[in-house]
Amino acid sequence: MNRVAGMASEPLSRREAGKAERRRLIIQAARDLIRETGNAGLSMRGLAARAGVSLATPYNLFGSKRAIVVAVLQDVRQFQERFSTLQGADPLEKIFAALDIAIEFYIGDPSFYRTLWSALFDAYDGVRGEILNPKRDAFWRGLLLEAARAGAIAPDVDPALLLTQLELLLRSVMFDWVVGEVSAARLAPTARYGYALILLGAASPEWRGPLKARVLEAQALLRQVG
Amino acid sequence: MNRVAGMASEPLSRREAGKAERRRLIIQAARDLIRETGNAGLSMRGLAARAGVSLATPYNLFGSKRAIVVAVLQDVRQFQERFSTLQGADPLEKIFAALDIAIEFYIGDPSFYRTLWSALFDAYDGVRGEILNPKRDAFWRGLLLEAARAGAIAPDVDPALLLTQLELLLRSVMFDWVVGEVSAARLAPTARYGYALILLGAASPEWRGPLKARVLEAQALLRQVG
DNA sequence: CAGAAGTTTAGAACGTGTTCAAGCATTTGC
DNA sequence: GCAAATGCTTGAACACGTTCTAAACTTCTG
């Protein structure tokens, strides 16, 4: 087991210091390579050369290319500092401000973070559009329009945008299931919880009752499955 | 440009017939390999051998491994048929029933779909947990608890579960941005729209006003950015 | 200081997705 | 019917991430 650098509380033996230094070199080289050449230049051979180490060393110190990318991602973040500037009175205001900060953080250096995330998930080409095929989309749109016509959705809410949100949520839940982050037992309740919450947010007053019931039902299920 | 097989309305020349047959063979081989060996066995060389074709043929006919996986995914789906059984009176009922069907569809054959999706996104090891680091998580939890204490969130809504939903949504939006599916201009409004909807669904009555305003504001922005 | 323990190194190798020049079959124009 | 044109298939090859071996090097132990 590797002793992790941690907070540098203990004096760090000579050997560990050397490793830490090499780790630093590799992370720095990865960052530079991404900056200069994008994802294409970030090959393990190039990375090793740039860091002035052998090809095997990054594997000894990190284990895999993905681990290195994650290390870059963690090393680079100064979220905490920016979050600490949040001093709004209204708690909701703070939530949305925090959301903006998180997004701005990535948007502020798009090519860098795009590359970084693309190295994490390999997915690139228009996977989304192909998975959620048009027929299925039309079907869902129909369902939402029907709900809107029935007066279940507040008239000033755009059903198309609402549908987008539902699909965003479902995709994340499915992804977690695929990756093993959420169990099969929790999958359906989690999705239903999200759907119910979003729909409740969009509901007209007279439909709030049944939707709230669904929210609580899914929530109870989630707590039970725990 | 390749002439797509389509609905077989035209008689399909000899060449096209051969291609269609090879396509069928490859998809079938992919499905079989996933069933028998899981993701590990699904190499392009193995796939080509199993389909009785040369290695380059799948690339000529589909373009990439991912495209083949997508083809398997699309080929296999009988969503339409199952969706067509939806005959509930209540439109909301239908939405949740459709959601259940969609999920059951995947859960019904977990190893198959897990493999399929894993081949789409390469991500596997605990990426999620490493990206969203604990400090950040604690920060967000604090924000939500604060909102709950202030009475903004209905007392019967679990802030932890609520937070999960917000993060699910944000992750999907970020992913779309990374992949280029959503522009930088739409990123923030889309996220805010989702957050506002979810929070509105969870809000106590007296906080609904400002949240509804945020929903409409984000919605207007989204329409404007188009 | 000498031996033991642990790491890096160079190099080759494996299996992967993907591409390319060259050959072959089908299709097209006459 | 036949020859030219088209475009698909093929086997070889490339670059990649990753692993392995043996040797050289550095650090720790006594």
Image (cartoon, coloured by chain):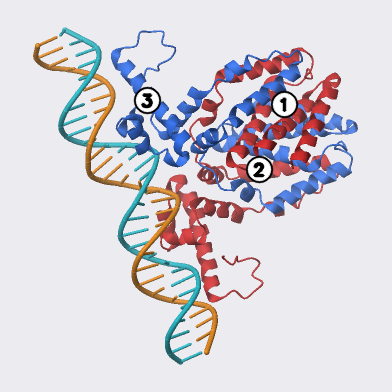
Chain colours: A blue, B red, C orange, D cyan
Residues at discs 2 and 1 in contact (Cβ within 8 Å)? no
Residue contact between numbered discs 2 and 3, judged by CB atoms under 8 Å: no
Which residue was labeled with disc 1? A219
In the rendered image, the quadrant that contains the C terminus of chain B is: top right
Left or right: B141, with A111 as reference point: right
Q: Which mark is residue B105?
A: none
Residue topped by disc 3: A25
Q: Is label 1 on the same chain as label 3?
A: yes
Name the residue at the front extreme: A36
Q: Secondary structure at mark 1?
A: helix
The chain under label 3 reads A
Residue at figure coordinates x 79%, y 28% from the top left: B214
Q: Quadrant of residue B192?
A: top right
- Residue B161 appears in which quarter of the rendering? top right
Q: Is residue A175 above or below residue A209?
A: below
**In the rendered image of this protein, does residue B18 appear above or below residue B100?**
below
In the rendered structure, the answer to whether residue B214 lies left or right of residue D16 reads right
For the point 59% across and 32% down, which residue is it?
Answer: A183
In this figure, which residue is indicated by the disc labeled 2? B104
How many marks the image carries: the answer is 3
Marks 2 and 1 share the same chain: no
Give the amino acid at mark 1.
Answer: Gln
Which comes before the other along the chain, label 1 or label 3?
A: 3
Chain bearing tag 1 is A
**Numbered disc in front, either 1 or 3:** 3
Task: Please name the amino acid that badge 2 sits on.
Answer: Glu
Q: Residues within 10 Å of mark 2 (few under 14, many from 20)?
A: some
Residue under the point 33% across and 16% down: A17
